[in-house]
Amino acid sequence: MSNLLVTENVIKNFGGLVAVNNASIAVKEHSFTMLIGPNGCGKTTLINCCTGILKPTGGRVLLGGTDITGWTPHKIYEVGFVRSFQIPLPFLGLTVLDNVLGAMRNPGESPFRAPFQRSWVQEEEDNVEKAMSILRRVGLEKHWNLPTQALGAAQLKMLEVAKGLSSGARLIALDEPIGGVDPASADEILTHVSALKKEGLTFLVVEHRIDIAAPFADYIYAMDLGCIIAEGPPEKVLSDPKVIEVYLGKGAEAC
Ligand SMILES: Nc1ncnc2c1ncn2[C@@H]1O[C@H](COP(=O)(O)OP(=O)(O)O)[C@@H](O)[C@H]1O
Ligand SMILES: [Mg+2]
């Protein structure tokens, strides 16, 4: 399978701090690729450099072969690469369904097009149908009419995935999707994500809780101190002495 996302020697400095140091990763199409590492090792910063939230200090980011380095987040979103944040930020006053509809294209977005739009009602009805089918795929269809305040942590994470799907994403980066979620719900989230992968989506998942998430991964990159210190299938990476050392809290030597 071909690589959908590639980072080539990405560097991100914050003043004198090197948060990401020459990180090169490749996310294969239709894979569940995981990025692991201790707190503060640069996982979120690398995702931010890929999705346009931050501009890398050096290196390149390629999506489907196109150089997207330094593109704005909305432009990257438009070409099918979306991400969730560590802390979900839904529109709290709105229902689950409205949150998904809010992430979709709507004829009302263009003041020039809107008055001449003949199929407005039809388009909105189609969007509702599409949103409901997405909620079904992430296990939220029963909760479509609830305000988002009524959702638990795991459901809020799945709502983020639903919003990503509604935009027609082909690559979804999830930043700690099971953070703050109990183990049974975490398993449920990852099972849904795996099912979506089988439907053809690609996931780059940043996770801290490797014991729960690693069994779902096809390929893992391990980071420490901004560097990629190991990569490979889960069993290879999790038995790598450098990775074990980092997780035992000693910290690896700078790369
Ligand atoms: N906007 C920022 N300004 C300055 N330092 C930052 C910023 N974002 C992250 N950092 C620092 O960069 C390092 C990597 O952070 P982060 O990517 O959030 O780690 P992780 O997601 O692996 O926990 C940390 O030392 C963090 O304090
Ligand atoms: Mg983080």
Image (spheres, rainbow, N blue to C red):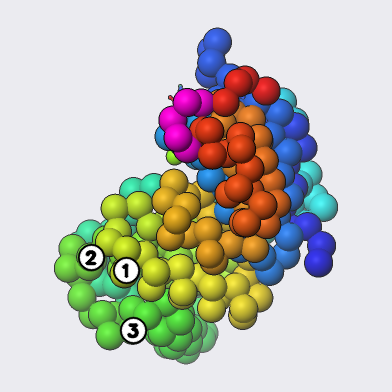
Location of the C terminus by quadrant is top right
Residue 134 placement (x, y as % from top left): 46, 80
What residue is drawn where x is 54% and y is 39%? Answer: 244
Which residue is depicted at the point 38% across and 57% down? 178
Residue 248 included in the magenta stretch of the image:
yes
Label 3, residues with CA under 10 Å away: few <14, some 14-19, many ≥20:
some
Q: Report crowding for label 2: few under 14, some 14 to 19, many 20 or more residues within 10 A (C-alpha).
A: few
Q: Main secondary structure of the magenta part?
A: loop
Name the N-terminal-most of marks 3 and 1: 3
Please tell me whether mark 3 sits on a helix, a strand or a loop. Answer: helix
Is 164 included in the stretch rendered in magenta?
no
Q: Which quarter shows the N terminus?
A: bottom right
Tag 2 residue: 152
Asked whether 238 or 60 is in front, the reply is 238
Q: Secondary structure at mark 1?
A: helix
Q: Which residue lies under the disc numbered 3? A: 141
Looking at the image, do the residues carrying marks 2 and 3 touch, with CB atoms under 8 Å apart? Answer: no
- The three-letter code of the residue at mark 3 reads Glu
Measured as percent of width and height from the top left, residue 124 is found at 43, 82
Q: Which residues are magenta?
A: 247-251
Query: Residue 146: horizontal and vertical position, in percent?
Result: 20, 75
Q: Amino acid at mark 1?
A: Ser
Tag 2 secondary structure: loop
Question: Do the residues bearing badges 1 and 2 touch, measured as CB atoms within 8 Å?
Answer: yes
Query: Looking at the picture, which amino acid does disc 2 mark?
Result: Gly
Examine the image and state in which quarter residue 25 appears.
top right
Q: For residue 90, which quarter of the picture?
A: bottom left
For the point 28% across and 85% down, the residue is 142
Q: Which residue is pictured at 41% across the width and 84% down the height?
A: 136
Mark 1 burial class by Cα count in 10 Å: few <14, some 14-19, many 20+: some
Q: Tell me how many marks there are.
A: 3
Task: Give the label, 1 or 2, closer to the camera.
Answer: 1
